[in-house]
Image (cartoon, grey):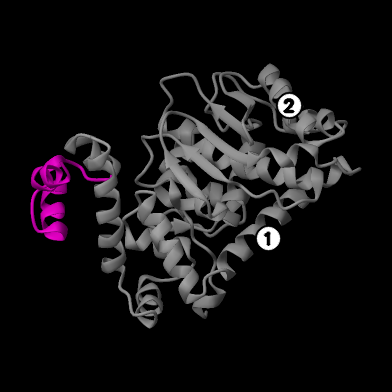
């Protein structure tokens, strides 16, 4: 198979295994589960590999149906498969997307245990947020991230519009892996607080709701989601790729393998395409490192906090990297800044 024809492997197997295990499936039962879902039995064998989002959609749809639980075991009680359809019947009666986005949280908060939804207006922005009460488990946070895609697709289905995402925020505890599927949004990704927050322009509030057939919502929203994947895969010309790499590095993602995967290519192809632009991955990484360190030091952050934000396990590792890039220590550089 040519690399251009490969599936876009964006979701870490580790995250999917975490959610499936939390739903009650032991590792020994997963091959049989994959077989029942008509997916390759070896799909989740390597925890360090990635899975195509379309396969994630298929697997979790089957898990939800088999368990009769749309929360995949992340709630204190089950939410019967088909509950979202009941919520949609109310949203479809709204006149505009703004009204529908208000209806959906109010309806879901009545039937979904634990998880909370809200829509807030802040200046020219519209925030669609989801969270679990503290402490939120890793499986619950993964569920929240994954849930953003069907809801975003539902909003697009209701209006027939593209609906640009301005920003996406996920929990501060997730910077090492959260970019996996979220890269499809191709927007600024923030790691702070808890839960998730999808930010749109308030202009989308006035978009009218179309007359639609409720029976079509699953098929139509999946096609919308799949179209986003295709566009994400096809947007990487060499110059566009460099921007994508810089955005990922700016969002705290330093894994070359993960960034290559999010661009639907191998590490070797990533290096070759960057080389055609006369730049290397290391040069881009050091450039972003310099820019972020300069900003954080100017803002007065501690060395420990900067190390955490940049994905280092400890301050000593960060100091070594800083000295390699800048030629002197963070303390010396901060002193030079005055």
Asked which secondary structure carries label 2, the reply is helix
Rendered view: 76 above or below 148: above
Asked which secondary structure carries label 1, the reply is helix
> Which residue is denoted by mark 1 in the rendering?
227
CB atoms of marks 2 and 1 within 8 Å: no
Q: Looking at the picture, tell me which residue is in the foreground, 110 or 68.
A: 110
Residue 314: image quadrant is top left
Confirm whether the magenta stretch covers residue 312.
yes
Residue extending farthest to the front is: 338
Q: Is residue 107 left or right of residue 294?
A: right
> Which residue is denoted by mark 2 in the rendering?
102
Rendered view: 315 above or below 123: below
Q: Position of residue 130 (x, y in %)?
A: 57, 29
Q: Is residue 47 visible?
A: no
Q: Earlier in the sequence, mark 2 or mark 1?
A: 2
Rounded to the nearest whole Å, what is the CA distance between mark 2 and mark 1?
26 Å
Point out the stretch of residues depicted in magenta.
310-338
Q: What residue is drawn where x is 49% and y is 67%?
A: 264
Q: What residue is drawn where x is 64% and y is 58%?
A: 228
Rendered view: 109 above or below 39: above
Q: Position of residue 134 (x, y in %)?
A: 43, 19
Confirm whether the magenta stretch covers residue 199.
no
Q: Looking at the picture, tell me which residue is in the foreground, 333 or 320.
A: 333
Q: What residue is drawn where x is 22% and y is 45%?
A: 312
Q: Position of residue 286 (x, y in %)?
A: 25, 61
């Amino acid at each position: 198979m040519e690399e251009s024809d490969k599936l876009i492997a964006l979701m870490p197997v580790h995250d999917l295994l975490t959610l499936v295990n939390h739903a009650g499936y032991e590792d020994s039962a997963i091959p049989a589960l994959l077989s029942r879902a008509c997916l390759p039995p070896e799909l989740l064998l390597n925890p360090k590999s990635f899975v195509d989002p379309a396969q994630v959609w298929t697997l979790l749809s089957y898990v939800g149906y088999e368990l009769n639980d749309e929360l995949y075991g992340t709630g204190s009680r089950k939410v019967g498969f088909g509950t979202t359809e009941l919520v949609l019947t109310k949203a479809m009666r709204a006149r505009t997307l703004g009204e529908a986005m208000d209806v959906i949280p109010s309806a879901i908060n009545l039937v979904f245990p634990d998880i909370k939804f809200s829509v807030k207006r802040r200046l020219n922005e519209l925030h669609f947020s989801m969270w679990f009460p503290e402490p939120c488990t890793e499986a619950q946070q993964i569920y929240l991230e994954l849930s953003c895609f069907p809801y975003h697709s539902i909003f697009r289905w209701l209006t027939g519009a593209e609906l640009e995402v301005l920003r996406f925020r996920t929990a501060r505890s997730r910077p090492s892996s959260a970019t996996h599927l979220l890269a499809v949004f191709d927007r600024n990704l923030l790691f702070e607080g808890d839960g998730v927050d999808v930010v749109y322009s308030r202009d989308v509030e006035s978009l009218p709701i179309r007359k639609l057939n409720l029976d079509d919502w699953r098929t139509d929203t999946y096609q919308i989601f799949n179209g986003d994947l295709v566009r994400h895969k096809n947007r990487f010309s060499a110059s566009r790729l460099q921007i994508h790499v810089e955005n990922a590095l700016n969002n705290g993602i330093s894994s070359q393998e993960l960034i290559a995967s999010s661009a639907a290519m191998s590490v070797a192809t990533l290096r070759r395409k960057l080389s055609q632009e006369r730049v290397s991955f290391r040069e881009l990484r050091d450039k972003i490192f310099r820019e972020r360190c300069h900003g954080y030091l100017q803002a007065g952050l501690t060395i420990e906090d900067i190390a955490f934000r940049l994905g280092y396990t400890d301050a000593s590792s960060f100091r070594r990297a800083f000295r390699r890039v800048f030629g002197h220590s963070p303390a010396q550089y901060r002193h030079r800044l005055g």
